[in-house]
Image (cartoon, coloured by chain):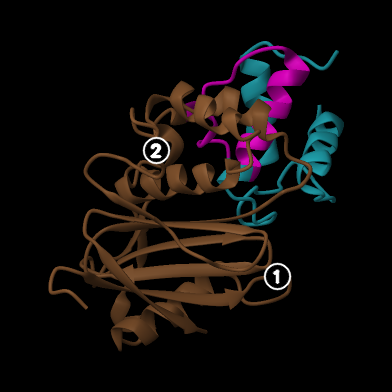
Chain colours: A cyan, B brown
Amino acid sequence: MLQLIQDIIYNVTGKQGITYETDFVQDLALNSFDVMNIISAFEDHFDTTIPTREVWHLHQVKDVIDYLAQKGFTQP
Amino acid sequence: MGADRIPAAIFRAPFSEGGPGSHALLLRAASRYSGLSPAALGELRTGPWGKPSFSQVPSLHFSLTHSGQWWLCAFASVPLGLDLQIHRSHADPGRLSRRFFHPREDAWLAQNRYRDFFDVWCAKESWVKYTGHGFFDDPATFSVVDEAGNFPALEGVRLRLLPFAPGYSLCLCAREETVVEWHDL
């Protein structure tokens, strides 16, 4: 799953060097537009809709991995 | 300047990896605007939806934003919201608009092949920064295009698209009419 997140973030923002502890705001300086783009990319990948209100609690990459696991999303 | 116009000071600084972080820039700008030392401003705290304020000067209203190579922060005596967005060439405006925007906004944008997508984005984000809710509120539930097709328009506030650098959109949201003063950090 980490590789998928790395690929999506790179494709959307051009940022590299993503680890489990990477913080989207503190480390990558992403803004809301970047986050919405990333959400959209995840939605396309998993063919689902992710409520925007749920993602603002996800600060680090590992939070996203936990969130996706809770929702039952696994990497094809 | 009309008596009912509120001064809003916008500080701008280059923003890049290796340079001063957003927190350091905010402290510097807030000190210059208020005339207070960073210590006198107090701790930076966040409200229930994440909107920041200074513990010792809660009446100091500000809104910061960064995108591309720029960091900006607006200060005023009244609540306000500021959003800057670089025009990202790899973004798909149509897809993002259909997914996240109000149907009226999407229809309005589609008329001009989404040419004004980033202006709409900034207007919407300046509003959610003004309210302090961020995008905890579903962005598709409100529209900055009114029923008559006017943009930017949202009941109860003034949305001002401000000229900035080429390839950027910038919008300031406040209930009051504002007059903007620019400052370089």
Q: Which mark is residue B144?
A: 2
Residue B50 visible (yes or no):
no
Total number of numbered labels?
Answer: 2
Q: Which mark is residue B172?
A: none
User: Image check: B136 left or right of B90?
Assistant: left
Counting residues from the start of the chain, the first of labels 1 and 2 encountered is 1
The quadrant in which the N terminus of chain A is found is top right
User: Image check: B18 left or right of B102?
Assistant: right
The image shows residue B143, relative to residue B12, as above or below, that is: above
The image shows residue B133, relative to residue A28, as above or below, that is: above
The quadrant in which the C terminus of chain A is found is top right
The secondary element bearing badge 1 is classed as loop
| Residue position for label 1 | B16
Q: Residue at x 67, y 36 (%)?
A: A37
User: Image check: B15 left or right of B57?
Assistant: right
Q: Which region of the structure is painted magenta?
A: A34-58
